[in-house]
Image (cartoon, helix red, strand yellow):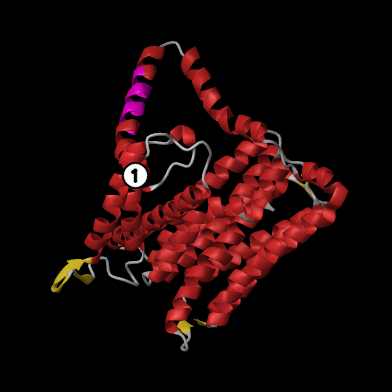
């Protein structure tokens, strides 16, 4: 259940807000391209690598068929909507509703497992945190061994130390900014200064997030009718005394984690993810203008790879830890969440703004190619693995990696000649 709710939200948040930012700024081709290419990257390239590394291994039939069929159905429905060149509000809402139905089905199946739940989870490859951590840190351990066993370790150590210092200097201002605006829920990380700063600055950040509904500099009559101050300054005037009062009165950290603090931390984390996604889209648009690259190609490559490389690292680490079935299970629910909730939410916003008119979509052959290869990877995995009695063969891993290479080659050719 957690895999299709909290885990999907955590892993898919950058994709969700990147899609919302792309569609909201009129770059829906970038949003479509990123979601589809990221889905193809995970369902073909990542699944292929896991299969090559760990095959043959068995999968639990019911969860595998459920996840792939739902993802395939969602992709087909989105493909139909895109070919129709227009989307209605009810269709956009249907994407989000379809994922909610999927979550409900997963919850029902988990409850239906009953006493056999533990056995099924073991067969599916669900493991403890310690085992996952061992798989994730294994590559770093091997790198460390190479450094220590090298004949001349001093230059390597000096270079690594310099890189660490540069990284810390780069991260310091970002870390301070996040601490100023994201409350720390753990009592051991509580700071009176940062908590007071949160009280003063979090309302400003939320006001900035609502800039499209209420301008950040909206003039507000303050005290005197002929005196108008910007809205952000009025909010700061209201929050600063509360922050100062908190700094004077509160001297000891809370004894336990507090739910309001957790909720505020979650909301502020969402704000920063959304803001970062918007700036990333602006950078991609600027890069595309400078290099004269179409936005669909940027979505198919840079944005998709950046959002999905974490899936590759995590799933390969799980396969190295001896749990390829669990790695395979995460390759379908996550991209489906990004498509239905990420792109679906963006389309809901745009169709709501256009209502009662329809939101029109412009045809681009690169998006069609992305749809085709995504559908091929999903249908191929479903047919081949089912035919092999739910044992993943190694040859299929090579086929999937080759399919993704062909997809990228075709996409580059189309981008070059179609623009």
- Specify whether residue 161 is painted magenta: yes
Q: Is residue 13 above or below residue 358?
A: above
Left/right of residue 11 with respect to residue 392 in the rendered view: left
Residue 310 position in % (x across, y down): 52, 45
**Quick one: quadrant of the C terminus?**
bottom left
Residue 386 shows in the view: no
| Magenta-drawn segment | 158-167
Q: Work out whether residue 303 or residue 326 is closer to the camera in this orientation and state it.
A: 326
Predominant secondary structure, magenta span: helix
Nearest the viewer among 99 and 198 is 198
369 displayed left or right of 395: left
The percent coordinates of residue 76 (x first, y second) are: 64, 72
The percent position of residue 308, horizontal first and vertical second, equals: 52, 50
Q: Is residue 353 above or below residue 395?
A: below
Residue 4: quarter of image: bottom right
Residue 18, how many percent across, how many down?
A: 44, 60
Q: How many marks?
A: 1
Residue at the disc numbered 1: 246
Q: Nearer the viewer, residue 416 or 257?
A: 257
Residue at figure coordinates x 65%, y 50% from the top left: 330
Q: Secondary structure at mark 1?
A: helix
């Amino acid at each position: 259940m957690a895999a299709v709710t909290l885990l999907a939200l955590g892993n898919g948040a950058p994709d969700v807000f990147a899609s919302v930012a792309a569609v909201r700024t009129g770059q829906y081709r970038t949003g479509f391209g990123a979601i589809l290419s990221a889905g193809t990257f995970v369902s073909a390239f990542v699944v292929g690598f896991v299969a090559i590394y760990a095959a043959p291994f068995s999968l639990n039939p019911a969860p595998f068929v459920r996840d792939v069929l739902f993802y395939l159905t969602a992709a087909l429905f989105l493909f139909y909507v895109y070919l129709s060149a227009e989307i209605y509000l009810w269709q956009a809402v249907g994407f989000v509703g379809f994922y909610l139905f999927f979550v409900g089905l997963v919850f029902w199946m988990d409850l239906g497992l009953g006493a056999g739940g533990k056995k099924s989870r073991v067969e599916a490859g669900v493991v403890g945190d310690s085992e996952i951590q061992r798989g994730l840190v294994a590559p770093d351990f091997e790198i460390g061994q190479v450094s220590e066993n090298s004949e001349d370790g001093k230059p390597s150590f000096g270079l690594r130390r310099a890189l660490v210092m540069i990284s810390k200097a780069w991260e310091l201002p970002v870390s301070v900014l996040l601490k100023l605006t994201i409350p720390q829920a753990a009592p051991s990380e509580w700071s009176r200064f940062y908590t007071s700063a949160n009280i003063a600055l979090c309302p400003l950040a939320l006001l900035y997030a609502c800039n499209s509904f209420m301008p950040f500099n909206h003039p507000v009559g303050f005290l005197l009718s002929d005196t108008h101050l910007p809205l952000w300054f009025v909010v700061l005037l209201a929050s600063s005394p509360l922050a100062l009062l908190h700094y004077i009165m509160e001297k000891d950290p809370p004894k336990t984690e507090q739910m309001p603090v957790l909720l505020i931390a979650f909301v502020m984390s969402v704000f920063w993810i959304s803001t970062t996604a918007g700036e990333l889209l602006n950078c991609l648009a600027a890069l595309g203008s400078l290099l004269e690259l179409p936005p669909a190609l940027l979505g198919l490559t840079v944005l998709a790879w950046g959002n999905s490389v974490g899936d590759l690292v995590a799933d390969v680490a799980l396969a190295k830890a001896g749990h390829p079935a669990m790695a395979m299970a995460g390759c379908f629910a996550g991209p489906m969440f990004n498509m239905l909730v990420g792109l679906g939410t963006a389309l809901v916003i745009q169709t709501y703004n256009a209502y009662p008119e329809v939101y029109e979509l412009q045809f681009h052959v690169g998006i069609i190619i992305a749809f085709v290869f995504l559908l091929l990877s999903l249908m191929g995995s479903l047919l081949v693995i089912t035919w092999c009695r739910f044992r993943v063969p190694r040859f299929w891993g090579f086929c999937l990696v080759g399919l993704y290479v062909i997809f990228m080659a075709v996409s580059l050719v189309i981008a070059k000649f179609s623009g």
